[in-house]
Image (cartoon, helix red, strand yellow):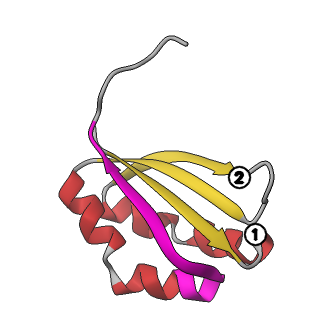
């Protein structure tokens, strides 16, 4: 299953989070299967999310959408997101 890692720098996490949560329906409709959200331990306004997607082309289409760009601007994302489109590799035990 393909994954996308997204790193964002935020103006204010508390302002960003409700917009991010509200966009979940759009992610799901685009093919997201869910993911994990991480906050930088040294900078709480930097986040990384790793999402599983049904298809890599759907993920690319989603991250290029004008609706997502508009939502990120509304939420106070600073700069462009740092995106990594990932293919499955292997699970590691430790």
**Which one is in front, 42 or 27?**
42
- Image coords of residue 38 (percent x, y): 65, 48
- Image coords of residue 19 (percent x, y): 62, 76
Q: Is 20 on the left or on the right of 66, as rendered?
A: right
Q: Quadrant of residue 89?
A: top left
- Placement of 50 over or under 79, stated as above or below: above
Secondary structure, mark 1, is: helix
Q: Residue at x 43, y 79 (%)?
A: 68
Q: Is residue 75 magenta?
A: yes
Provide the residue span drawn in magenta. 72-87
- Placement of 81 over or under 73, stated as above or below: above
Q: Quadrant of residue 31?
A: bottom left
Q: Main secondary structure of the magenta part?
A: strand
For the residues labelled 2 and 1, say whether their Cβ atoms are less than 8 Å apart. Answer: yes
Q: Is 29 on the left or on the right of 49, as rendered?
A: left
**Quadrant including the C terminus:** top right
């Amino acid at each position: 299953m393909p994954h996308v890692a997204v790193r964002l720098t935020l103006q204010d996490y508390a302002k960003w989070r409700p917009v991010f949560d509200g966009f979940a329906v759009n992610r799901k409709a685009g093919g997201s299967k869910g993911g994990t959200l991480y906050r930088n331990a040294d900078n709480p306004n930097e986040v990384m999310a790793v999402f599983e997607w049904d298809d890599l082309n759907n993920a690319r289409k989603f991250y290029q959408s004008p609706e997502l760009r508009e939502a990120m601007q509304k939420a106070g994302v600073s700069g462009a997101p740092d995106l990594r489109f990932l293919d499955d590799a292997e699970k590691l035990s430790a």
